[in-house]
Image (spheres, rainbow, N blue to C red):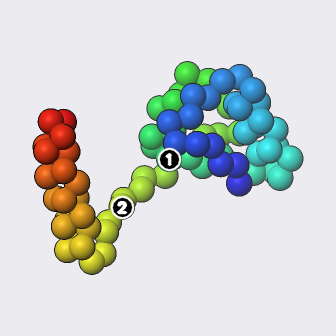
């Protein structure tokens, strides 16, 4: 497993690191999120096939999160945002 920060801009060094790690463990595929696939697409083809994983996020229970989000929006409007 390799982890990169959110919104990471993949360069040659990171792409090489990913491919080396995949080869080192004999991976059949490199799995990434659809969001990161878009950032890696320009580096294709990879030595190891690149597969995407779709993620769905849900908040449970939704009530407290909705209240938090509503409070944030009210505060932002109060600041003129």
Q: Could you say which is closer to the camera, residue 16 or residue 25?
A: 16
Q: Report how far apart the C-alphas of labels 2 and 1 lie in the structure.
A: 13 Å
Question: Alpha-carbon neighbours of circle 2 within 10 Å: few (<14), some, or many (≥20)?
Answer: few
Please give left or right for residue 54 compared with residue 24 in the image.
left
Q: Could you say which is closer to the camera, residue 8 or residue 29?
A: 8
User: Does residue 1 appear in the picture of this structure?
Assistant: yes
Q: Of helix, strand and loop, which one carries label 2?
A: loop
Q: Quadrant of residue 45?
A: top right
Q: Quadrant of residue 78?
A: top left
Question: What is the quadrant of the N terminus in the image?
Answer: bottom right
Please give left or right for residue 69 compared with residue 4 in the image.
left
Question: Alpha-carbon neighbours of circle 1 within 10 Å: few (<14), some, or many (≥20)?
Answer: few
Dot label at residue 57: 2
Please give left or right for residue 66 compared with residue 53 in the image.
left
Residue 39 in percent (x, y) is at: 52, 30
Residue 32 in percent (x, y) is at: 56, 46
User: Does residue 47 appear in the picture of this structure?
Assistant: no
Q: Of helix, strand and loop, which one carries label 1?
A: strand
Residue 44 vertical placement versus 71 (above, below): above
Of mark 2 and mark 1, the one earlier in the sequence is: 1
Residue on which the image places disc 1: 33
Q: Residue at x 27, y 77 (%)?
A: 61
Residue 23 vertical placement versus 39 (above, below): below
Q: Residue at x 19, y 50 (%)?
A: 75
Dot label at residue 50: none
Question: What is the quadrant of the C terminus in the image?
Answer: top left
Residue 77 in percent (x, y) is at: 13, 43
- Pair 2/1: label in front: 2
Residue 68 vertical placement versus 79 (above, below): below
Q: Could you say which is closer to the camera, residue 41 or residue 5?
A: 5
């Amino acid at each position: 497993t390799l982890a990169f920060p959110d919104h990471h801009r993949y360069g040659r060094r990171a792409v090489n690191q990913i491919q080396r790690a995949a080869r080192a463990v004999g991976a059949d595929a490199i799995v990434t999120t659809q969001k990161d696939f878009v950032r890696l697409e320009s580096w294709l083809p990879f030595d190891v096939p690149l597969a995407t994983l779709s993620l769905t996020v849900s908040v449970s229970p939704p009530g407290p999160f909705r209240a938090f989000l509503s409070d944030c929006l009210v505060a932002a409007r109060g600041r003129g945002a």
